[in-house]
Image: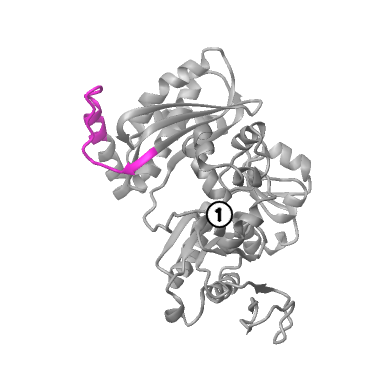
Amino acid sequence: MPSLCRDCDAYVAETIESCSTCGSFRIISHPDLETLSIAHIDCDAFFAAIEKRDNPELKHKPVIVGGGKRGVVATCCYIARLNGVRSAMPMFKALKACPEAVVVKPRREAYSEASRSIRKKFEALTPKVQMLSVDEGFLDLSGTTRLAQAFPALSLARLAREIEADIGITISIGLSENKFLAKTASELDKPRGFALIAKREAEGLLAPKPVGFLHGVGKQLAKKLERDGFRLVSDLQESEARDLIRRYGETGLWLHQRAHGIDNRPVRTDTLRKSVSAERTFNTDIAQYDILEDRLWEVCEETATRAKRHSVEGSTITLKLKTKDFRTLTRSITLPSGTNLANAMFRVSKPMLERETQAGRAYRLIGIGLSHLQDARWDTRDLIDPGIEKRAKAERASDAARSKFGNASVVTGRSIKLTEAKQKKSN
């Protein structure tokens, strides 16, 4: 079985435990070492890694990236994870689990800059790059061996060292024959890992795992499958595809394929974003409708700005509310056509907000999401609301003015009121 040293690129045609050239124990061995070409790359604790890179004093400390005491954990380093901290955990619970943790506010631009640098390095290996988020993506390295003068696994080992040296963070790599197995492999050896899975060995690897191990099976689906007698992946493997389809519809076919390691999706370079959203966490719980309405306008404006920046519009608008006991409520409505206008989102979501505030319930968070996205159009018409075309022109004129003269050049009356209220509170 051929082996490759991840630290010095030494290659031997047999299985070894350590490198005779440099003494490293970071060895990858696999029968298909030279032929597997679909990779999933995930940056290790990305936000926290950037914070530690930029502040060496944090290197050996548990670090949590997130909001204030009423916020949630965006991510955390592996030291914090060993103490039970997890992403999306309420901050007060995270600090209870790891009271010595250092909490750092997110620095989006720093993360975006690092992400752009990482993507450039991906694209230097292959034009077939599908970014899933700022810190992970799929690469199809089929046909790159001759140009790179290196088989894909060797190119990826070099890439990992290059990212560590130039950007100052580590990555974990999964290499296989399809996206699902590559993603599965990248989770097997984190952090700073490199794992390979061939399709022929997938069934044996997956069989003893709980169904929740399959990437894409969330907690609720896993519970349902377990109630129905599918506790292990092997239980799915032993079922006929038609039986799973009869029971779960299209999800049944998907479960059958993934349980057998089947995934025919190509690595796409033109993937459209699935959703655009924004949310606000309040310092104190809010029950008054008029105050919540103002906060609703803020997240509608921010969501609209993000949608326009990505040249997309969506037909489904989702209102998100979180109660003081962390229970999340979502209410959605689907429009006949897509929109990326703050006014349209606000008009549609206001009735949903009104219904949820009638009982006087207090909320700690509000958000608006836009999904079922498509490329943005610029001929907004709505037979149900003829006035939308006029408002659309006004909003886009405001967008153009802000783009040319700055965000402060055009401000709505509601935004002025919110700004004045915040200034009074700070004084």
Residue tagged 1: 261
What kind of colouring is applied to the model shown?
A: one colour
Where in the figure is residue 167, as x and y percent of width and height?
Answer: 56, 68
Magenta segment, which residues? 372-394
Residue type at numbered disc 1: Gly
Q: Height in image: 191 above or below 71? A: below
Taking depth in this image into account, of 157 and 294 the one nearest to the observer is 157
Taking depth in this image into account, of 263 and 193 the one nearest to the observer is 263
Relative horizontal placement of residue 374, taking residue 358 as reference (left or right): left
Relative horizontal placement of residue 58, taking residue 54 as reference (left or right): right
Residue at (45% x, 28% y) in the render: 296
Q: Height in image: 288 above or below 24? A: above
Question: Can residue 323 be seen by looking at this rendering?
Answer: yes
Where in the figure is residue 427, as x and y percent of width and height?
Answer: 56, 32
Question: Can residue 190 be seen by looking at this rendering?
Answer: no
- Disc 1 is placed on an element classified as loop
Where in the figure is residue 92, as x and y percent of width and height?
Answer: 71, 37
Q: Height in image: 107 above or below 303? A: below
Among the 4 quarters of the image, the one containing residue 345: top left
Q: Inspect the magenta stretch and tell me whether residue 318 lies in it.
A: no
Relative horizontal placement of residue 415, taking residue 114 as reference (left or right): left
Taking depth in this image into account, of 14 and 304 the one nearest to the observer is 14
